[in-house]
Each structure stands twice: as C-alpha cells, then as structure tokens.
Image: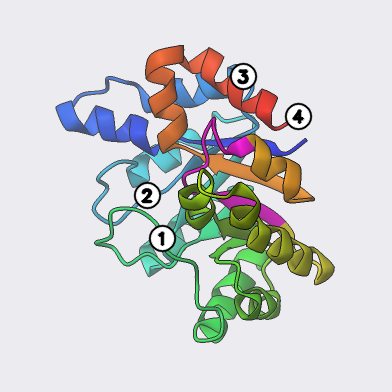
Amino acid sequence: MTKLSVNINKIATLRNARGGNIPDVLKVALDCERFGAQGITVHPRPDERHIRYQDVLDLKPILTTEFNIEGYPTKDFIDLVLSVKPAQVTLVPDPPDVLTSNAGWDTVKNKSFLKEIISDFKKAGIRTSIFVDTETINIINAVETGTHRVELYTEPYADNYHKNRELAVKPFIEAAKIAIDNGLEINAGHDLNLDNLKYFNQNVKDLSEVSIGHALIADALYFGLDNTIKMYLRLLQ
C-alpha cells in the first residue's frame, strides 16, 4: 500500500492568520497520525508564512510516524534538517518568494549542488528525495546526485486528468519505470485529491508515498479530518 503523508502547512497558515495557537499545529499532526496517516510533511519557508522553524523542532520529538521536511536547501534549511534528523528530507527548487512549488529540479544544471547537499544528509542517516518532473534526463541525472527517491511533480497530471486521464498519467508511468529501473524509489505530490488519486496510484507502479496537504485540509472542512484521512487511505489500498 502506498503511504499517505499529510502536509500540515495549511493548518499553520490558518493559525498564523489570527495569531495565538488555534488551531494547534502539534495537536493536528498527532490527530493525523491517530486517524491513520503514515507520515507528516512540513515545508518551512524563510518567511515562516505557515510552518515555523520552531514548529519543526517541536514536532520531531512527538511524532511516531515518518517525518518529512521539504524545502529549498538554504544554509538555514540544511542546518535545521541536520539538527532535527527527520526520516526524510524532500528538496524542492522553490525560490523564497514563490507561492507554492511549481516545478521540478533541473538536475543537469544543479547536479553538483544537489550531490553535495545529499551527501551531507546521507551521512546523517536522512533519506533524501528530490522534486522532479517526468523528463527522462532529469530522472537519470537525479540518480547521479545520490538521492534515495524522487518525488514526481503531479500538477500536470491533475490539470489534465479530466480531459484525458490516460494521456495525463502516461508520462508518470514511464518516469516511474525509469526511476525504479535505475534504483530510485518513487514519491508523488502536488494537486492530488479525492478525484484523481486512485487512478494515479493504480497506474503508477511501486509508488512509495504521496504527500497531500491543500486538497486534504480543504476536504476536511466538509468531511472532518478523521473521515477525510480515511477516505484518502482507501484510495491508496
């Protein structure tokens, strides 16, 4: 079964909008685990507009499932990850001012940069995943960085799912096969939701994990967090 990691950034966004500690990010993370999520994902940005660095430090000792920290590898981010030592770090190519992740790494151009950072994480015993698109050249060069996994950027799939789902998923099937054949494990994330997740999971073989935040938290407004997590888990069986 593909694991579900719940990205709790939007919970932090809601908290930060009003100040104080409602909703409580730590309690929500523990509730996600209690309701069946197999991991918690956070993406601390330099401006701390949702998850704060202190949240990351506070979450590590209380979580019992897999902790995944994603972000652009600035020095501050790298230092945070090395101090916390999560199960997984996911490297994204976002500059600090972007609203959300919107592209994968150019692993040709950034190969040496990524290789050095990944080496440091591996020495610390942290599994590394890098955010990539489905271009073969980026997956092949991802192998050469030494990363354990790649996370396939799924917004193109989500955008085209209702137009032609077979065509939408085809590049991801092919990309996953190339990655697996070259010794990488596969994660996926971005705009996966209750409509398109099951088809993606059924067709992209050997998928280890999906990271879902925005859609899942939005669905929880209607269905409740416990029920929503179970709905997503059923789609991954």
Say which quadrant the N terminus sits in.
top right
Taking the magenta stretch, the answer to whether it contains residue 194 is yes
Q: Name the residue under label 2.
A: 44
Camera-near label (4 vs 2) is 4
Residue 15, visible in the rendered structure: yes
Q: Which amino acid does label 1 sit on?
A: Phe
Mark 4, Cα crowd under 10 Å, few <14 / some 14-19 / many 20+, is few
Give the magenta part as a residue range.
186-197
Q: How far apart are marks 3 and 4 (CA)?
A: 11 Å
Q: Which amino acid does label 3 sit on?
A: Lys
User: Can you tell which quarter of the image residue 229 is in?
Assistant: top right
* Image marks 3 and 4: residues in contact by CB distance under 8 Å: no
Which is more N-terminal, label 2 or label 1? 2
The residue positioned 65% from the left and 51% from the top of the image is: 166
Which is more N-terminal, label 3 or label 1? 1
- Tell which of 57 and 144 is nearer to you: 144
Residue 88, visible in the rendered structure: no
The numbered mark at residue 230 is 3
Label 2 residue SS: loop
Q: Distance between the residues labelled 1 and 3?
A: 32 Å
Q: Name the residue under label 4.
A: 237
Q: Mark 1 points at which residue?
A: 77
Q: Position of residue 58 (x, y in %)?
A: 43, 35
Q: How far apart are marks 4 and 2 (CA)?
A: 30 Å
Which is more N-terminal, label 1 or label 4? 1
Label 1 residue SS: helix
Camera-near label (4 vs 1) is 4
Which is more N-terminal, label 4 or label 3? 3
Say which quadrant the C terminus sits in.
top right
